[in-house]
Image (cartoon, rainbow, N blue to C red):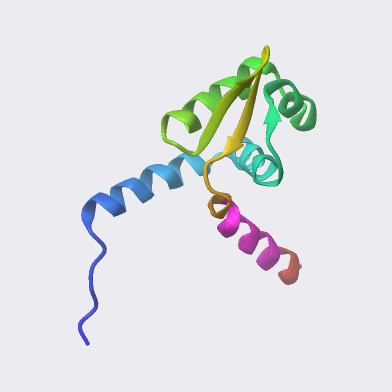
Amino acid sequence: MKPKPIPEHILRKNAIVYKIMANPLRLGILNILAQQETTLMELCELLEKRKSNISQHLSLMGAYGLVYSHRSGKQVIYSISNPHLVDTCKQLTKLFEEST
């Protein structure tokens, strides 16, 4: 059976997502959002980073559909678009924990 190549447009989209996820802070944000919806201020506290820094990363990830946001009163609540985004990260973490 001949292998079927992945369509070019899918490969390009994957490459963009990999570039976005190549940042440790963005991975941290995604891992938190995979566990629960949260606000910008809660993310800042959990990750010990400035509001402007976290906000820039959320904006980039939102532009590519990795995170969603919605308003609840005066607060903006962030959530991950698909919890499977962090599956690879979890597998790599297990791999590195087992090899040490």
Residue 71's spot in the image, x, y percent?
61, 20
Pick the quarter of the image with the N terminus. bottom left
- Residue 92 painted magenta: yes
Q: Which residue appears at 72% of the width and 70% of the height?
A: 99
Magenta stretch?
86-96
**Residue 29: quadrant of the picture:** top right
Residue extending farthest to the top is 74
Q: Which residue appears at 72% of the width and 24% of the height?
A: 49
Pick the quarter of the image with the C terminus. bottom right
Vertical placement of 52 versus 6: above or below? above
Q: Which residue appears at 79% of the width and 26% of the height?
A: 45
Residue 56's spot in the image, x, y percent?
54, 21
**Residue 38: quadrant of the picture:** top right
Vertical placement of 99 versus 20: above or below? below
Residue extending farthest to the front is 73
In this picture, residue 39 sits left or right of residue 87: right
Residue 57's spot in the image, x, y percent?
55, 27
Q: Which residue appears at 74% of the width and 64% of the height?
A: 97
79 or 96: which is nearer to us? 79
87 or 81: which is nearer to us? 81
- Residue 42 painted magenta: no
Number of numbered markers: 0
Residue 74's spot in the image, x, y percent?
67, 12
Q: Provide the major secondary structure of the magenta segment.
A: helix
